[in-house]
Image (cartoon, coloured by chain):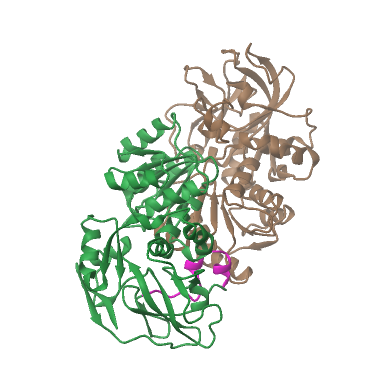
Chain colours: A green, B brown
Amino acid sequence: MRATLLHGPRDVRVEQVPDPVVRRPTDAVVRVVASCVCGSDLWPYRGVRPVREPRRIGHEFVGVVEEVGSDVARVAVGDFVVAPFAISDGTCVHCRNGVHTSCVHGESWGSADRYGDMVDGGQGEYVRVPLADGTLVVTPEHPDDALLPHVLTLTDVMGTGHHAALAGGVRAGSTVAVVGDGAVGLCAVIAARRLGAERVVAMSRHEARSALAVRFGATDVVAERGDEGAAAVIDLLGGVGPDAVLECVGTKESMQQALDTVRPGGRVGYVGVPAGGPELPVPQLFGANIGVLGGVAPVRAYIEGLLPDVWAGTIEPGLVFDGTFALDEIGAAYAAMDERTVTKSLVLP
Amino acid sequence: MRATLLHGPRDVRVEQVPDPVVRRPTDAVVRVVASCVCGSDLWPYRGVRPVREPRRIGHEFVGVVEEVGSDVARVAVGDFVVAPFAISDGTCVHCRNGVHTSCVHGESWGSADRYGDMVDGGQGEYVRVPLADGTLVVTPEHPDDALLPHVLTLTDVMGTGHHAALAGGVRAGSTVAVVGDGAVGLCAVIAARRLGAERVVAMSRHEARSALAVRFGATDVVAERGDEGAAAVIDLLGGVGPDAVLECVGTKESMQQALDTVRPGGRVGYVGVPAGGPELPVPQLFGANIGVLGGVAPVRAYIEGLLPDVWAGTIEPGLVFDGTFALDEIGAAYAAMDERTVTKSLVLP
């Protein structure tokens, strides 16, 4: 089959690799119907995380089950499935606590599992899925082309935005600011409104993205950043920061902006993968009773809850995809995100 | 009147100072019936925070109202009152949000207020109380000698322990570990049990304090610290860390111990005043979805809620006082805490 390999900085290639097969009774093999490029894929792509040898990549995909192992009971051949970005058994104590990303049997897409066997990356034609019963979620039917992008966001960005909102404690009547206008930040706007937030301030200086934030329910847009951005949000809300700030970037600067924006006693829900930061100024947190919650989103925990709203069209997170590429155009799919000419690239094998 | 002044490292003296009077219509003057020494008083006492000139000290006291200003409506002469460690108006947006420590009109005991007038410290005979309606809480009756210590803890340590438990998200059935066996940590044990925690592990290697923790409801005691302490708690709980760890010390080491102990997806509720730390290792927080909440406790918000349990004897936080001193013995009251021969010193003017 064909699959994407990262060879080095800004060098991704589609190459022939062995077809995946069921190796363990708990495995499934899924034919990828759609996948995408994640903001976190850009780090190794940019060389921030050096690659020693060509490696498989991609951790967001949906598709159709082609084969299942003998112990797989909840997923059947022919099912359309959503694969979250982390592999989990669904039964260990951490999964039962809703923290599937800490699964004691967790594995990662695109690298060898604990038995030394390749777990394919999502940016390819087929994927061997370990712990299929725990990892995969079956959709009610096969989604049509219009629905496909929205369902695809449940593999990562929609669930991650939702995690930020939960971590921030967003509830009916909350005031919220969202730092970051990437796909996750935009999904965090959806999530905050869905949880009942009354005011959602999108912090964005990008015309198309801020327009999408408004379409997703943002009540206000603030273009300023840093100290000025914090001051502008606080001013907009009548002199008091929002109850929750959702930090969806992962830099020291974005975290500081979030901490400077939130009201005393409020919470920062953060899901931006820490990129050499963020740093947390403890005296500031302590003095103002600012809570910091979040982390790598256990999106598996949220798929069943979000799926009905996606299926019904109540939320349309798939609008974050503003570029569609064939698998053979994977280089262009990465370059477009790297150069910020698109927010998020959808890849069709 | 007589009041305590800190002159320099390990040099506290009781001296004659001007009697306080009502200076503003919102003031009250309170005759101190009991006060105490706070763990945070030990920092300037030890010279960690240098003192440039003699300064008034003490921020935990209860007493009887002697005089009120013309705008004071909720407090009357003769009332017995609890004074939390922070002065607040009770009406600003932060007070309404329950974060009285961020009151926009907040003042501090033992230093000049925004008008340049002395706000007396609690370790003296009388105190001018600004914003008396917001700051003071009237008790149902004058407490007798037996009840007095318990009521006194509502000025700080009991409310601070409660804040840690709330910040940690403790609720019915929670598993909890408490880092720190000082007065606040011991009160955190009370608070956790009061909120319904099923298991409360006190981390203590001090015989008398761990015995008191057990009396307060701790189900287990772990003497080990650091990595060994974390491992021991996790082992005790069947291989999974507690839902909440209450960090009641404020050092880098104690925070790291808390973070290493809590389960993935759990919360560290911290109230230890950061002493050159604690530091927060963001990658660890992010990877395991550990939330960190807490800060300087808005104990004013909790007095009314905790007072009935104190009054009924359901909780006995005053047992943390294991040394009682006359005001003239203030040096001994500090030295006993400094040398850890007592957990907490009660001072009777």
Up-down: is A163 above or below B18? below
- Which residue occupies 71% across, 49% down? B194
- Residue furthest to the top: B70
The magenta stretch spans which residues?
A: A92-109
A252 within the magenta span:
no
Percent position of residue A277, x then y: 33, 54
Task: Give the image quarter of residue B137.
Answer: top right
On-image quarter of the C terminus of chain B: top right
In the figure, B143 relative to A98: above or below? above
Name the chief secondary structure element in magenta: loop
Does residue A248 appear left or right of residue A322 in this picture?
A: right
Magenta stretch containing residue A103, yes or no? yes
Q: Position of residue B11 (x, y in %)?
A: 52, 34
Between residue A140 and residue B138, name the one nearer to us.
A140
For the question of whether residue A206 can be seen, the reply is: no
Q: Decide if residue B79 is in sight here.
A: yes
Q: Position of residue B160 (x, y in %)?
A: 60, 42
Q: Position of residue A185 (x, y in %)?
A: 38, 51
